[in-house]
Image (spheres, rainbow, N blue to C red):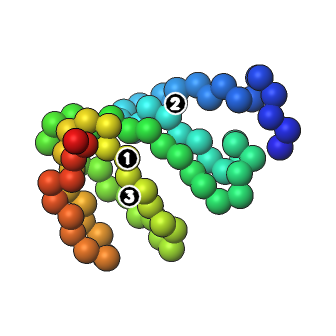
Amino acid sequence: MQYTPENMLVRPTSDPADPGLILSVTPDQAGWDYISFQVRQLAAGATWSFSSGDNELALVILTGSIAVESNRGEWRGLERE
């Protein structure tokens, strides 16, 4: 994919079925081979579940704290310092 000023700007996502989803970029949309990218906002006490299949998953915490449960382990009290 050739990047231009028009396709470099990614607009926020709006999905009534997934109100916590702010932005979602797929490899096809971005011209990438493997990486997907999402921005989510969760209210205090809210939960979010996702199956990454055979893919790796990275979580970036901007505010608050989270607990993660996966088939590879559990991590609690993860937070941004």
SS under mark 1 = loop
Find the residue positioned furthest to the front.
81
Q: Amino acid at mark 2?
A: Thr
Q: Which residue is mark 2?
A: 13
Q: Amino acid at mark 1?
A: Val
Comes first in the chain, label 1 or label 2: 2
Tell me: residue 12, above or below residue 47: above
Label 1, label 2: how many angstroms apart (C-alpha)? 19 Å
Q: Find residue 38 and report its horizontal and vertical position in percent.
A: 48, 43
Find the residue positioned furthest to the bottom.
72
Q: Nearer the viewer, mark 1 or mark 3?
A: 1
Q: Find residue 5 and report its horizontal and vertical position in percent.
A: 77, 23
- Which of the labelled discs sits on residue 60, or is there none? 1
Would residue 76 appear left or right of 15 to someone viewing this image? left
- Which of the labelled discs sits on residue 50, or is there none? 3
Would residue 70 appear left or right of 23 to someone viewing this image? left
**Label 2 Cα neighbours within 10 Å, binned few <14 / some 14-19 / many ≥20:** some
Image quadrant where residue 65 sits: top left
Q: Residue at x 32, y 37 (%)?
A: 62
Label 3, label 2: how many angstroms apart (C-alpha)? 18 Å
Question: In this orientation, which residue lies closer to the viewer: 34 or 52?
Answer: 34
